[in-house]
Image: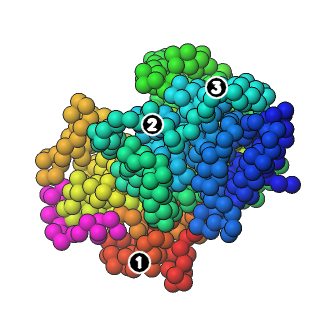
Amino acid sequence: MSVITTHRDGEVLVIVSDNPPVNALGAAVRDGLVAAMDEALANDDVKTVVIRCDGRTFFAGADITEFGNPKAGSVDLNTVINTIESSPKPVVAAIHGTALGGGLEVALGCHYRVAVPSAKLGLPEVKLGLIPGAGGTQRLPRVVGVEAALPMVTSGDPIPAKLAASIGLVDKLVGEGSLEADAVEFARGVIGNASHPVSSARTDKIAGTGSGVFDAFRKTNARRLKGFDAPEAAIKAVEIATKHPFAQGLPMERALFEPLLAGAQSAALRHLFFAERAANKIDNLPADTPILPIARVGVIGAGTMGGGITMNFLSAGIPVTMVEREQAPLDRGVATIRKNYENTAAKGRITADQVEQAMSLLTPSLSLEDLAQCDLVIEAVFELMEIKKDVFGKLDAICKPSAILASNTSYLDINEIATSTSRPEALIGLHFFSPANVMRMLEVVRGAKTGASALATSMKIAKTIGKVAVVAGVCHGFIGNRILAARQKQGEAMLLEGILPERVDRVLTDFGFPMGPFQMADLAGLDIGWTKETSDPTRINYALCERGRLGQKNGAGFYDYAADRTRTPSDEVNALILDFADKSGLRRSDVSDEEILERLLYPMINEAALILEEHIAQRASDIDVMYVHGYGWPSFTGGPMFWAGTQGLDKVVAGLGKHADKWPDLSISKLLRDKAAKGESFA
Ligand code: T1G
């Protein structure tokens, strides 16, 4: 059965693609589309054409699995699109689902576009380290103008069909359940038009565009685009569209596309694309494992984490009962949730009605008893085992038998927590990352006795609330924080050598992290786990707590913070650090940035390899997904394990040896050594 079929509806030829799962524009689809257009042009009874797709979506782009090994003999996408655009008979794209990348480029080659209101349209190529390679940067600005095109091409984020209609990208919104019929009717309606719009020939939307627009856009978006190659190429390509005829612009777009396709950043980002999807696949979990319905969620704790966790479910339309012990913190928690939604609405990202809709699903409570009918309960109480066990002991008596009981703990032993209940199969870790309503990462911690349904349901609900989930086994810190501890330990050691916080942080921000270890410590709070009674003045961060320097929250930590949270190095702290270094006898003046980077990152790679050896993580790419989405590891390097492979594992092992005196108790992973010796990567 061909992936492309045609059928007639009177004088309209309807071309249908059926290439699951997302109608990717693979070789068979491309060849089939050209053959179908030839059929349309050869048949005088055919006056107009509709192109649509079966399944979940209109073409969602080129077939990413083909990159680097195009099917021999198939026509390329530019040929397909030019065949459509040069047709004397009008062609109408009928869009549902997500018209993305090459899919939107095909639609732009059509003379008209109709879409159902729930459809989305976008050019996500930059998310793969690419730019559109089949005319998208040349046609889109000609259809919608530069101001609307630039954000689409450089962010890669799709826009809803209604917005697309308002900027002229979609000609008509049609019925959700009558896409083909409405598209055919639209196609009939244009047969009599004297001419039909040809995207590549239009100049009305780009005439007179000056270079200032592009420089201003670069300046405004510099922070967001920092470190990525593709967005700058995309801006250049759109600027080309305003300065050159299409026939010249198309090859110039290609000339910008090819080096990106061959480049390291695209290889890294394509790796992450598939890694995110691989993370959903769980070893020894039967595919037919029952998924439990989650109709109501309970969250214990209305603080930063509890409130953020609650918002994930409210935003997904799932009612939440949020429980605190006292009225004041409960009220504060509710007010904070409302404020967060209202801030989002103020930026135009949601409507006021959506704010009220989300808030209407929230039930504040002072009693755990109110969680009796919840299908999933997540605790976000203080990180102390005794407190966790007390809470779960009570939940065991209150919650219905089918309830899943989850802990948001970031490093405590789920297996020990489970001993406080009679239902260890219901216990799981759902480790959200702060701010929980923003960070996409969810670490799903599988206890020794966690049941298959609890695990499968947790993975499904993670996707429902828009999270990227990675399964971790139980150890101190699971995957994420155990690896992070290796980096933090080296950071602290560097202070004792007189290397100041701003230099260590700069080395990591230059690498591509949004912030370094000391900025992060200030953000989290230096007093986590610290008390006056148990303080240890020989540790610099505790010495800072003793001086009342608790971090960003009280304006002073490793750095000084102004009211607007801008930070400056602290002379007081730097003097203290140098004093510590002098007294320790470890002060050095010969440390290079390269050494700092190696000593921060190589122990993380080693710890990750140990985690793989211990089967705490299912696969190396899961660790890449975890670090990119949970800890800000720069995605254009592919994540720690992919990056280590690009460096060469032998270089990592040699680096661990070179600085061995800096980590006397470090055990080098056998897996890492073996792979290095064989010249392998973690892929
Ligand atoms: N090519 C090949 N496979 C793809 C694919 C693609 N473009 N998109 C998705 N898949 C697979 C995916 O790996 C998974 O496989 C299954 O489909 C379901 O995906 C020339 C050069 C469309 C929004 O970047 O954003 O066009 O794991 O789990 O959550 O200028 O997939 O089941 O084996 O993500 O419902 C541009 C990428 C390409 C779109 C659906 N297009 N895809 O999300 O399902 S470059 C994209 C997505 C390009 C042109 C350039 C999403 C989705 P498996 P899924 P979903």
Q: CA distance from mark 1 to mark 3?
A: 57 Å
Query: Are circles 1 and 2 on residues that touch, CB within 8 Å?
Result: no
Image: magenta residue range: 577-598
Q: Is residue 583 magenta?
A: yes
Q: Is residue 59 magenta?
A: no
Please provide percent x and percent y for residue 348. Answer: 46, 23
**Along the line of sight, the residue nearer the viewer: 217 or 675:** 217
| Position of the N terminus by quadrant | bottom right
| Position of the C terminus by quadrant | bottom right
**Along the line of sight, the residue nearer the viewer: 637 or 219:** 219
Task: Tell me the SS state at disc 1.
Answer: helix
**Along the line of sight, the residue nearer the viewer: 135 or 537:** 135
**Along the line of sight, the residue nearer the viewer: 680 or 307:** 680
Please tell me whether the stretch drawn in magenta is mainly helix, strand or loop.
Answer: helix
Residue for point 48% across, 62% down: 258
Residue 82, relative to residue 349: is it above or below? below
Residue for point 23% across, 30% down: 563
Residue for point 42% across, 25% down: 347
Per the image, the residue denoted by label 1 is 651
Q: Amino acid at mark 3?
A: Lys
- Whether residue 348 sits left or right of residue 87 in the image: it is left
Please provide percent x and percent y for residue 132. Answer: 52, 51
Q: In the rendered structure, which disc, 1 or 3, sits on the residue that comes first in sequence?
A: 3
Per the image, the residue denoted by label 2 is 203
Q: In the rendered structure, which disc, 3 or 2, sits on the residue that comes first in sequence?
A: 3
